[in-house]
Image (cartoon, helix red, strand yellow):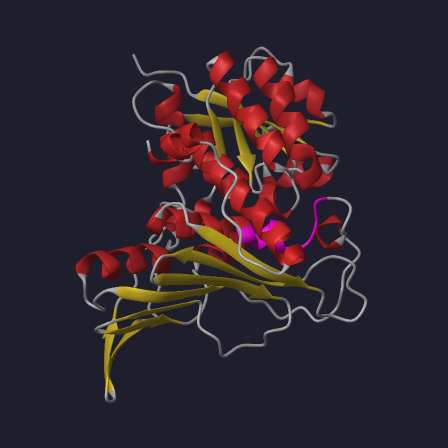
Amino acid sequence: MAEAPLRVALIGYGAAGRIFHAPLIRHAPGLELALVVSRRRDELAHALPGVEVVELPEEAVLRPDIDLVAIASPNATHAPLAEAALRAGRHVVVDKPFTLSLADARRLAALAASTGRLLAVFQNRRWDGDFLALREVLASGQIGRLTWLESRFDRFRPQVQDRWRERANEGGGIWLDLGPHLIDQALQLFGLPARVGGRLSRQRDGAVADDGFEAWLEYGNLKVSLSASMLVGGGLPRFAAHGTAGSWVRHGLDVQEEQLKAGVAPGDTEWAKDARPVRLHRGEGEIIELPVARGRYEVFYGAVAEAICGRGANPVPPAQAVATMAVLETVVAAAGLGRMLPLPLTEAECAAFAG
């Protein structure tokens, strides 16, 4: 007899919930999107027919017929909603950023351990096609010993918008929005850095929250630069990896987000296909074009379902989310002091991250 699917409650149907979580949950084997917390009843009746809609997060968290709560609400609500869901005995997925502080991240990690519930952070960009291709080229040795990695996530949105993501006091700002993605990718490639530093800026007229950043992660002779801006109209690479045998350069963002916006989903024939090549520069004008790996956002929720059923590992466990939060918080502190700082992680936390 086939197992009944795990019933999922999605809290939030803004950009993150609508574009990413809802379609990926619906296409994940072993999961059923049963309930959405939102005030957009009319929109949801059309977009997700048959899915129950409630307005209060408490209605989802306390429902005994819900197995997994996915939190895609504004950043400042992540920690309290995750805590409530864990205390109610639910498994939990939290969109990035995990929390707004390292202290809250540690507290939730401990709570998940004590309750025996799965707690995972949605880091879909581990499965960007270009990031998967970068992992492959580094493992292959084609650019020799890596000395410098540039990772950028730029947009051109010159007008400040009146929304929580661009307000300073609601967990807004580009550092908390895009920083978790770039940090998580760097930690997946290289582990914990010896020191971090950075600079946050307000570049647009009228900006009240940071809308640009540069962050630096130090790994001995390897330097990693992470940056993002709302005022880059184009021309800069998404990734540039420089080594002793050449440079690997990628322009443009992964296609999966735009496909999800257009209604293309996992299982469709064109899903995650990206015809744009990356370029391997060997020096003296030699350029080799290489294909981009096919992205796999669908892996995350499939792995979550398997982990809950005891058949696999948590794809993004709390120990990794705590480390990302430590980098987020320490870069802000380092920016204020104007110098590089070590991460304030304990030996046990470092071991758990590596573990």
- Please tell me which residue lies in front, 42 or 82: 82
Q: Is residue 115 left or right of residue 51?
A: left
Q: Is residue 265 left or right of residue 204?
A: left
Q: How many marks?
A: 0
Q: Quadrant of residue 78?
A: top right
Tell me: residue 321, above or below residue 204: above
Across and down, in percent, residue 229 comes to: 60, 67
**How far across and down, in percent of the image, does residue 222 sit?**
35, 61
Residue at the (52%, 21%) spot, across then down:
110
Front one among 152 and 268: 152
339 vs 268, left or right, is right
Location of residue 53 in the rendering, given as x and y in whole percent from the top left corner: 67, 28
Q: Which residues are magenta?
A: 171-179
Front-most of residues 103 and 34: 103
Residue 277 falls in image quadrant: bottom left
Residue 82 on the magenta span: no
Q: State the image coordinates of residue 231 (x, y, percent, origin top left).
A: 64, 72
Q: Residue at x 42, y 21 (%)?
A: 5
Q: On the rendered image, what quadrant is the C terminus found in?
A: top left
> Chief secondary structure of the magenta span?
helix
- Drawn side of residue 215 relative to residue 296, left or right: right
At 45% from the left edge and 47% from the top edge, which residue is drawn? 184
Magenta stretch containing residue 175, yes or no? yes
Q: Residue at x 43, y 60 (%)?
A: 254
Q: Quadrant of residue 158?
A: bottom right
